[in-house]
Image (cartoon, rainbow, N blue to C red):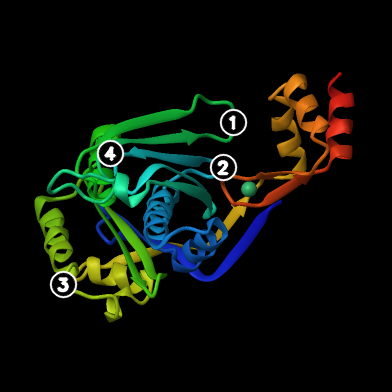
Amino acid sequence: MAIAFQSATDKWVKCLSGTGTIRAVAVSATEISNHLADRHNLTPTGRKALAEAIVAGLILSSYCKSGEKVNLNIQSSGWSHQTIIDANSTGEVRGYVLERAPADIQLARNIGPWGIGLLSVLRTKHDDAQPYIGTVPLLTGHLAKDLTFYWLQSEQVNSAVGIEVFMENDRITIAEGFLIQAMPGATEADISLIEEHLKKLHHFDSSSEIRSTPTRLLSYLLENQSFQLLEEQPLSLKCPCSLDRVKRSLTLIGVEELESMLAENKDFEIDCDFCSETYVFSPVMLGELLREMK
Ligand SMILES: [Zn+2]
């Protein structure tokens, strides 16, 4: 296994309102975002994009059933060509950002940094059940807003989503987010109360007390409502890549290509896209692989 990094501080916290009509999750993923961004050697912009996408992926996976996982795929005209995040119901995440050169980014006025494009969410179940894919257009270029549209469009659920990433000296100081959803039976009053809080949230800066933990953020968002904490899940980076898996993918490029690699008589390095682990193949290893294939 290439990476397995358990954060001591990052987690998601889920709760349900006393009336049972509103559910919410708050995610804090600062440490794992920095750790993965370091491994991928991203620019400050790439770090910010990765952190936003990690928070989004974890929000999506937090409501997965046991054994399910999600794959968030963002193809866009803004700060990344493509961003992929895998996350599962136990808070494990991995992913990458293919950055676009700043000179190549041309966004229309009022469009957020992600630009326009497509946002897809693939949900895979543990058993052999058919995976479910939901795709919506990226319209605003703001991930949280476009995700709100995703829940409405794909799952017909009224939601409020927030994602905030703060940077200081090219490091992520806060990567957090939340999802609040109206369950069947929620009243207009429930929903408008939350909307009022959301508006106020933007007036707080990164040093605000309410941002210090996911539980505090939830208390703030659901102020004046009794709510019950349902789950606190520590988060980790985990990539299941291995030398064997890379070997298997190498066999797909075919005997001819491998033979020409072998003819160069040098080491080849292959990096895992998801975690940047490097696997080195010596001429001896390539020779063995070829013998196995023939
Ligand atoms: Zn990997």
Q: State if disc 2 and disc 3 touch (CB < 8 Å).
A: no
Percent across and percent down for residue 241 are 67, 45
Q: Which residue is mark 2?
A: 67
Kindly tell me whether residue 38 is visible in this rendering: yes
Amino acid type, mark 3: His
Check disc 3 and report the residue beneath it: 203
Residues marked 2 and 1 touching at CB (< 8 Å): yes
Label 3 crowding class (10 Å Cα cut-off): few <14, some 14-19, many 20+? few
Quarter of the view holding residue 153 = top left
Which residue is found at the position 80% from the left and 41% from the top?
A: 266
State the residue at coordinates (40%, 47%).
Answer: 60
**Mark 4 vs mark 2, CA separation in Å:** 22 Å
Mark 4 → mark 1, Cα distance in angstroms? 25 Å
State the residue position of label 4.
150
Classify mark 4: helix, strand or loop.
helix
| Residue pictured at 18% horizontal, 71% vertical | 224
Q: Which mark is residue 127?
A: 1
Assign the C terminus to one quadrant of the image: top right
Q: Amino acid at mark 1?
A: Asp
Instruction: Establish if 188 lies above or below 30.
Output: above
Chain-order first, disc 2 or disc 1: 2
From mark 3 to mark 2, how far is it between C-alphas?
Answer: 38 Å
Q: Secondary structure at mark 3?
A: loop
For discs 4 and 2, the disc positioned in front in the rendered view: 4
| Contact between labelled residues 4 and 3, with CB atoms less than 8 Å apart | no
Mark 4 or mark 3, which is nearer the start of the sequence? 4
Q: Are marks 4 and 1 in contact (CB under 8 Å)?
A: no
Q: Residues within 10 Å of mark 1 (few under 14, many from 20)?
A: few
Q: Amino acid at mark 2?
A: Gly
